[in-house]
Amino acid sequence: MDEHNIQDDDKDKEALAGLSSVPPPQRKMHSYSQQLRTNSAHKRHHQVRKHSLDDIPKPTDHYYNNEDSSDDDIFARNSNNASGEDYIITHSQRLDQNLSLDSGCPPDDSRNFQPLPEFIGAGGTNSIFKVPMRATVHPRRPPCHELRPHPLRETQVGKFLRNIACTDKQLWAGQECGVRFWRFQDAYQPGLGTKVRRGDEDAAPFQESGNTAPTICLLVDSANRLVWSGHKDGKIRSWKMDHSADEPSPFKEGLSWQAHRGSVLSIVMSSYGDLWSGGEGGVIKIWPWESIEKSLSLRPEEKHMAALLVERSFIDLRSQVTVNGNCNISSSDIKCLVSDRVRAKVWCAQPLSFSLWDARTKELLKVFNIEGQTENRVDMPSSDQGGAVEDEMKVKFVSSSKKEKSGGFLQRSRNAIMGAADAVRRVATRGAGAFAEDNKRTEALVLAADGTIWSGCTNGLLVQWDGSGVRLQDVSHHPCAVQCFCAFGARIYVGYVSGMVQVMDLEGNLVAGWMAHNGPVIKLAAGDGYIFSLATHGGIRGWSISSPGPIDSLLRTDLAEKEPIYSRQDNVRMLVGTWNVGQGRASQEALMSWLGSVVSDVGIVVVGLQEVEMGAGFLAMSAAKETVGLEGSSIGHWWLDTIGKALDENATFERMGSRQLAGLLISLWVRKSIRTHVGDIDAAAVPCGFGRAIGNKGGVGLRIRVYDRLICFVNCHLAAHLEAVNRRNADFDHIFRNMSFSRSSNLLNNAAGMVRLLFFCCSLAFSTYLFRLLYSSGLPLVLSVAAGASAAVQTTRVTNAAGVNTEETKLDLAEADMVVFLGDFNYRLFGISYDEARDFVSQRCFDWLREKDQLRAEMKAGKVFQGMREAIIRFPPTYKFERHRPGLAGYDSGEKKRIPAWCDRVIYRDNRSGPVDECSLECPIVSSILLYEACMDVTESDHKPVRCKFHSTIAHVDRSVRRQAFGEVLQVNKKVKAILDELRYVPETVVSTNNIVLQNQDTSILRITNKFEKDKAIFRIVCEGQSTVKDEEDTAEYHPRGSFGFPRWLEVTPAAGIIKPEQSVEVAVHHEEFHTLEDLVDGIPQNWWCEDTRDKEVVLTVSINGSCSTETKSHQIRVRHCFSAKTVRIDSKSSTNKKSQGGSRKISSSSDAIDDSRN
């Protein structure tokens, strides 16, 4: 606005009369508001104001709306500047049109809000300060099928998805209130919108179960068309796969029973169809298939009887291997169970050990640790080891005994240093050992196609084991913790806590990797030609099994061309306020003047306070609270409640989150009308005080997701004093690099903070000791103090350097779409005296004062806030004032006479990489500043509060519409269809026989040959069912066991594997008499008179896949077990079996049986 046309009120004129009159230097003066009026045909008439308090008319209607905007008119920006100033001029004509069209406000009112000119700092194209790259389709990962778009975290309370599993036609998900499933045939359909609860509006259509306890694990039983789930309440439940779309929702559970006292952590079906479950305390139970099968056959009204039947049939493996109170397996919780169907074994993974079991006999074969060393015995821990660590930290640094006092100050200081150093050494040593051991904890386990087992650790290490538990190799492709595995064909997919998904071959070589989600990948599952990934926030994405490959570029190109179909734009206004309250409290009138008077058209309000509470005791307590994750104070809560009243909280605005670090406090409110589009709030804090450990200086931040775009707000209080420019720059750099909003990082920081605090105490004691020693030796006081302080700083620097993470990870602030810094940055005016500054302020010569601004000079040199923007300042300096003294006469007139300065600022960055960028999916957030001013009438602190109003246009994707477009591309694009057709190819294979006859202890060899010259063939043998042989005219009825398990009398080895091109593999089919441990007494079989001596027959299916094929071909082999010695004739057109005269081994004939090519 025109600075020369502003009239001062009488009160301010009297206050300014006493100021010294120093004439400004002779220079050309110009008005920034005059440049803005070049776009307007009419002159604006300004009302009289009180020093920067503009009475700007407020629109009567709210600006934001929830409808998709198709308006492509984006306000333009022009960097032409005749005055030579380093800022850009914002032309507001097109913005005014947008405001009148989008917000529904009257055109006359909306045009009163004109974007302010901005100053842009240098260095925005360098390193971490570069604007993050955005694109219509993510360029650094394969295009994905978004089955369930990322829901806002706040919508998922009590409903989070925790597991996924795929059947042949569905994807099932376990959630905190039951289970749900999606049909693959409906996977590209639009979302159900408001017909479903919040968070699922854009997800593909699904069906949901009734409410249950949280689901922890899932198991697919294709043989019986069931999905089994383990729950937090200790129950195992079954769910029918085949639900029609017409069935009412929610659907109900089938068989269920109480399996464990605590949570069911993992379930798996063994090679013989038994259900194994692992729970808390290392408990492993087996539920025999015979009892489950009988319970499933009972009628629904006999549900209680069915549950009792299963509950009483379990086998407790832990009790079987416990002798005299000592157990051979660890008492840690079961992490995961894996069935080794190649060798009929079951792997049980616990955090630091493994146990290997025989699936047929249920015997413990081996117990070994994560290093592969065999363990004969694991003692059950009797107490928590964490108590010892806490005891180590309860150290008295200074003894209070009278005997030690006699040693004098130096002796006491020495004792304090030695005691603190010893405490730090013990805690650090034990902590480092625990941390190193914790880094090796097993998190996931998977069986690969070649029969090897892969385990993943919390340090990112991937370990390969053979079938007997021998460690083969370990590889590391990513430094973050492994969360899950998925094996498909000749590939192994790995999900990490960082959101990364990597693809390996069977030898452990890295094939590809990409950032699949912005949160941890907690589960992977293969189905329908995709590898589906579930993120911790509940989003599910499908990745083509042909990725990375040519299909990615084809999909990316076609989806980019369809951008106008699914691209949307919405507008939102944000009010950002900062105030250094100087440990005072504000009146309700002050808060209304600062915030409440300008929020009528605002959707998001962010408030940052500094010096809410200070003092040495409070700072020390705050540092201690940070190490254990506690935050906030009573005064901080008072401020939150008081600000909430000014914003009409609960009626108009809703408080979403806050974060306090010592005297720093940041809070965020959202208007209820746009609450559905704002969420995923995260908080972080970075101390910058003494040793980078104390929070008297530093930053606190909040990160939110607005229309699927990330916006970060950081409240800073940087180093004070005129000469500390470099320290302020360093504080900003430290905050920018170290602010992490992820919970895992915050936990690590808190854990490291305890040791850091001890190091700080040591360094402080050492510096005091050194100061006393030097001063007593005659060194001048100033040098003694300097030496002590230097020693403390250097000691702390060394400890900090030891904890620096050298991993090159993407910074949270660098990856955000918009970052707003607010706070008391403490940059001062340089090269000017107190009297000159006050005189220029009285004459409102802000253009000249800006050239003396340290922050402006440092930004122009690219040393701080690189590439960020600030509106041109047109309000008086906000520091330093005498409390409760209004007007410009309130500037500090005491002994120190601090030079007025613009300490309190608001600076931001959006997605624009240049002065002029239109909002699009490539530049999703384009912001401008509508209001930037200080509230000079607020006198409760020595700083004046500052407020800044943003107008942001946000481009985002309609995920439901884009999913439809994705499905259309797959159906229409001929090149894509050709690639998908190639994935259906299965190598041609033959088997040596279709019929096998066994007697007791007989073995027959089945030969499978891969006739293809180029690709491997992956085979798997399952049992379709067993039948008792009756008269020839009767039709046999085959009853499958769980997950197509083998009957107990049949051994097939190997039951899965890989056949190289033009090679064969031999599979041993063996009959073995089977007796459980309960059937044997002194080694003699009991109840032999009840043994079923009738002949039995099973149908084995040999399934064949290529190394990366979505289709399956199969061979069927009939295996008959005969008790009698009579000659058995089996109709066969292709081969016959020859029985050896004196042996138990049978070799099938060399004639080949052609596969029936069942798909």
Image: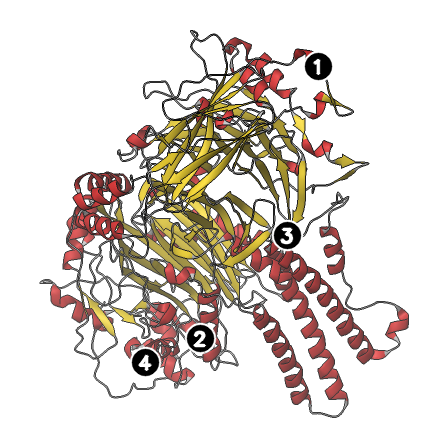
Q: What whole-number distance in Å separates the C-alpha atoms at marks 1 and 3?
A: 42 Å
Q: Is residue 734 left or right of residue 567?
A: right
Q: Point out the residue furthest to the left here.
A: 41
- Mark 3 is surrounded, within 10 Å at the Cα level, by few (under 14), some (14 to 19) or many (20 or more) other residues, namely some
Q: Check disc 4 and give the amino acid type.
A: Glu
**Looking at this view, is 1012 or 649 the one in front?**
1012
**Residue picked out by circle 1:** 1087
Q: CA distance from mark 3 to mark 2?
A: 50 Å
Q: Quadrant of residue 903?
A: bottom left
Image quadrant where residue 427 sits:
bottom right
Kindly report the distance in space between the C-alpha atoms of the residues bearing marks 4 and 2.
18 Å
Residue position for label 3: 372
Q: Which residue is mark 4?
A: 851
Q: Which residue is mark 2?
A: 729
Q: Is residue 617 in view?
A: no
Where 1080 sits versus 873, above or below? above
Question: Could you tell me the amino acid type at mark 3?
Answer: Gly
Q: Which comes before the other along the chain, label 1 or label 2? A: 2
First in sequence: mark 4 vs mark 2: 2
Label 2 sits on a secondary structure element that is: helix
- Please provide percent x and percent y for residue 900: 42, 76
Residue 980, position as x, y percentages in the image: 26, 42
Figure quadrant of the C terminus: top left
Which of disc 3 and disc 1 is earlier in sequence?
Answer: 3
